Image (tube, rainbow, N blue to C red):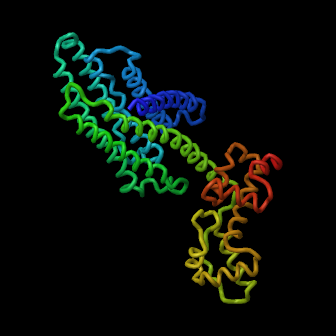
Amino acid sequence: MELATTIFNLTMIAGIFLGIFFIIFTQFSNRRKDKAVIYLNLIVLFITLNNLQIYLIDNSILEVNFFVRKLLIPWYVMILPSFYAFVIYYLKIEKQINHYIGFAITFFGLELLIRVLFALFFYGVNYNYAVAKYSQVEEIINVIYAFYFFVKAYLVFYKHSKLYAFVLKFDTIQWLKNFMFLGSLVLLLWVSAVILNLDKVLNPTIFIYYPMRFSCSVVLYWIGYQGFFNYEMLTERIELRRLVAKTDSEITPQNKEIKETGSIDKFLGIKEYIESNKRYLDPNFSLEMLSSELKISTSSLSQTINKDNSTNFSDYINNLRVEKAKKYLTKSEYKKYTILSIGLECGFNSKSTFYAAFKKFTNTTPSDYRLNNQ
């Protein structure tokens, strides 16, 4: 028990410092005024304030009586509404879906007002059971309230994907869906803690809340990091693609039929189709997709590419992507964009695959290439 308490306290302290550092760090970002980053900061701020409050009181750093302990400031009430607003702004669908921030602020303000009224009329009076009972009922209401916003976020992801089709061109948002799964586990732990303490109005078992508080800190600080990193990448890729559209000539895709002629002519036809339609920029592009589009068997395509290009399909496509990336890495107008965003915009689906392919075809890394060819 003592070891678990120590680990829990260390996690709380680390989380508090991490939250403070995260908020300070984002204030130096160019995106600090973006609504998505503002709400992401609010998520971290409310978690930090809530954890700091719990840590100071549970460890008797702040001496408080029964009344104050039962009526702590409910910072946690604003966490899920802030997350929901972040999701809406991240997916750029704020004009299509209401984000209920006004309602959340009103709800939070109402709970603060009730605390003020309790302090004015009942502080110093022996109404411990009434205060404890109110605290328990309020927590049950807050669980339902949090679940409401969680379901709303879930419905956005899985029922309204057409609304954020534009964002899906740049981000699969799988990291957000993973968070929803982890968040559901945290909510389940919270519900379990509330149920197990239903018959313990005056003296609830605090240790039951440790798993929920621990997992909540870990998961929500993770969303802070992931959210900021992915939002930076998303906005940068959108800007980068707009710049590319201005500087590169746009070619209308053509579904050209590849005739069964000589092997070299056949390969040239395949090559023209892939390059003129920029199919290599699709990170999901595969031999099977090309086979379906050209109505040629995969074995025939593979044999043609291997024979007349002296390489396999994967290397052929990655080489086209690398050549595209080299172009952007050396142009001054693309200097402000990160190497990773350039790699992703050139068709790679991750940093590791981009760096591995770039090293394979150039014998250098993208960062060294940019440094030596600016």
Q: Is residue 245 visible?
A: no
Q: Residue 79 occupies which quadrant of the picture?
A: top left
* In-image side of 25 versus 94 (left or right): right
Residue drawn at (65%, 87%) of the image: 259
Residue drawn at (20%, 35%) of the image: 198
Q: Is 319 situated above or below 131? A: below
* In-image side of 350 versus 109 (left or right): right
Residue drawn at (65%, 81%) of the image: 301
Q: Residue 69 occupies which quadrant of the picture?
A: top left
Residue 214 coordinates in the image, percent (x, y): 41, 36
Residue 337 coordinates in the image, percent (x, y): 67, 45
Farthest residue toward the bottom?
A: 261
* Tally of numbered discs: 0
Farthest residue toward the top?
A: 124
Residue 327 or 16: which is nearer the viewer? 16
- Which quadrant: the N terminus? top left
Q: Is 216 situated above or below 203? A: below
Q: Is residue 92 visible?
A: yes
Residue 211 coordinates in the image, percent (x, y): 37, 38
Residue drawn at (57%, 77%) of the image: 293
Residue 52 or 26: which is nearer the viewer? 52
